[in-house]
């Protein structure tokens, strides 16, 4: 049987929550670990004033356009509703 162990690049859509003001940030990257480090070290202008940030959700896609489309969806009203339902246990545990 031939080996199918080819490396596939993954693209991530992620949701961060500010531990300062509980607001969320939705982003996209192809290197989640590096991007999280950038957020935490204040290198991202969009989250710099809201540090510290906590990763509360992410999805991985094998296609960059699919991940970008998903990021855009999460930023819509419907996407925010989806996330609220998807993270219901997370939010209950914060009470």
Image (spheres, rainbow, N blue to C red):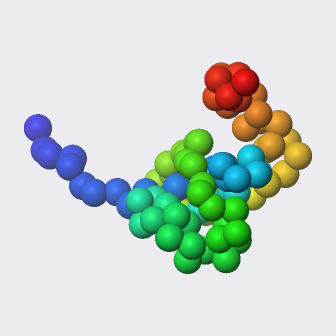
At 57% from the left and 73% from the top, the residue drawn is 42
Expressed as whole percent of the image width and height from the top left, the position of residue 72 reads: 75, 58
Residue lying furthest left = 1
At 70% from the left and 53% from the top, the residue drawn is 20
Q: Quadrant of residue 89?
A: top right
Q: Nearer the viewer, residue 4 or 27?
A: 27
At 66% from the left and 49% from the top, the residue drawn is 19
Q: For the C terminus, give its image quadrant.
A: top right
Q: Nearer the viewer, residue 81 or 6?
A: 81
At 55% from the left and 48% from the top, the residue drawn is 55
Is residue 27 positioned above or below 88 on the image? below
User: Can you see residue 32?
Assistant: yes
Q: Quadrant of residue 49?
A: bottom right
Expressed as whole percent of the image width and height from the top left, the position of residue 9 reads: 38, 61
Is residue 54 positioned above or below 83 on the image? below
Q: Nearer the viewer, residue 78 or 92?
A: 92
Q: Total of numbered circles in the picture? A: 0
Q: Nearer the viewer, residue 4 or 90?
A: 90
Expressed as whole percent of the image width and height from the top left, the position of residue 32 reads: 46, 59
Left or right of 18, for residue 79:
right
Residue lying furthest front = 20
Q: For the N terminus, give its image quadrant.
A: top left
Left or right of 62, for residue 15:
right
User: Can you see residue 88?
Assistant: no
Expressed as whole percent of the image width and height from the top left, the position of residue 84 reads: 76, 34
């Amino acid at each position: 049987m031939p080996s199918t162990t080819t490396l596939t690049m993954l693209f991530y859509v992620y949701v961060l929550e500010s531990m300062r003001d509980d607001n969320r940030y939705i982003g996209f990257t192809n290197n989640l670990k590096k991007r999280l480090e950038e957020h935490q070290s204040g290198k991202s202008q969009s989250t710099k004033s809201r540090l510290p940030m906590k990763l509360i959700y992410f999805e991985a896609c094998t296609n960059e356009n699919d991940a970008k489309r998903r990021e855009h969806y999460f930023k819509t009203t419907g996407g925010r509703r989806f996330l609220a339902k998807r993270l219901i246990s997370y939010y209950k545990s914060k009470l």
